[in-house]
Amino acid sequence: MDNITLSIVIPCYNEKNNIHTIVEKVLAAPIKNKEIIVVDDKSTDGTSEILDKEIAPLVSKVIHHEVNQGKGGALRTGFQHATGDIVIIQDADLEYDPNEYPKVIKPIVDGECDVCYGSRFLNQAAKGYLANRMANKFLTKLSNLFTHLKLTDMETCYKCFKREIIQAVDIKENRFGFEPEITAKISKMGIKVKEVPISYYPRTNEEGKKIGFKDGVRAIICIWKYRKG
Ligand code: UDP
Ligand code: MG
């Protein structure tokens, strides 16, 4: 583990209440070599100024978008700047725990796979909105039908890739359609994908959760659009 560099890509839109805390947690995560890349997706709540003043000295790169694109767009920018061996996605909220990075990257470090997803539903008690959970389960099953992967959590934030692999994917989706798109495209590459269980501390819409019904519909369209065959 000490020989690898982990690039952590943080898409960030209007997260003034969380950005400092999550960056502190990422800095404290038990990985020796880290490259932290924060992509500000044209925040309007003061996050951009916090990033320049307080966060920039703590991380490797802060990149500002000129216009708001969505999580997929922010990740596309972040991945282009990554130079580490392994790349992981970290949302700028507190729903996932950076202390679990070693668990998620270990199967890649050990050569068991090229891509590893952290699953919120593998041997885990149910958490979060019932509607979101049902949507996640449905979308994961639908995605599996086309990808032939046996995932339990396609929509998870903790997706971790060998850098060459994520940089070889042409990401088209700007918003949350990124999740089914990347899963479909990875499945076509004929590489090994694994899942490990992770913890989940869901936030509410009031606390800033941005994914919604329309994103679920878009996910169905993306599963079909990027399917195998
Ligand atoms: N995000 C972004 N641009 C946007 C919307 C969201 O970069 O236009 C970021 C957001 O700040 C967060 C991540 O994408 O770090 C996921 O957003 P959210 O937590 O609302 O989604 P969920 O956890 O429901 O997938
Ligand atoms: Mg989130």
Image (cartoon, helix red, strand yellow):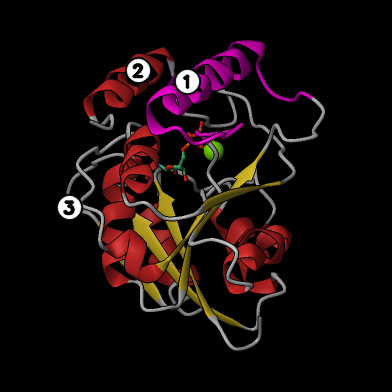
| Residue 44 seen | no
Question: Quick check: 138 above or below 98?
Answer: above
Taking the image as shown, residue 125 lies to the left or right of residue 115, namely right
> Which labelled disc corresponds to residue 220?
2
Taking the image as shown, residue 186 lies to the left or right of residue 148, namely left
> Which labelled disc corresponds to residue 66?
3
What residue sits right under mark 1 in the picture? Answer: 139
Disc 1 on helix, strand or loop?
A: helix
Question: Quick check: 72 above or below 103?
Answer: above
* Residues at marks 2 and 1 touching, judged by CB atoms closer than 8 Å: yes
Question: Quick check: 35 above or below 136?
Answer: below
Question: Quick check: 22 above or below 110?
Answer: above
Q: Is residue 87 magenta?
A: no
> Magenta region: which residues?
126-155
- Residue 224, horizontal then vertical, whole percent: 27, 21
Q: Residue at x 34, y 53 (%)?
A: 75
Quadrant placement of the N terminus: bottom right
Q: Residue at x 35, y 17 (%)?
A: 220
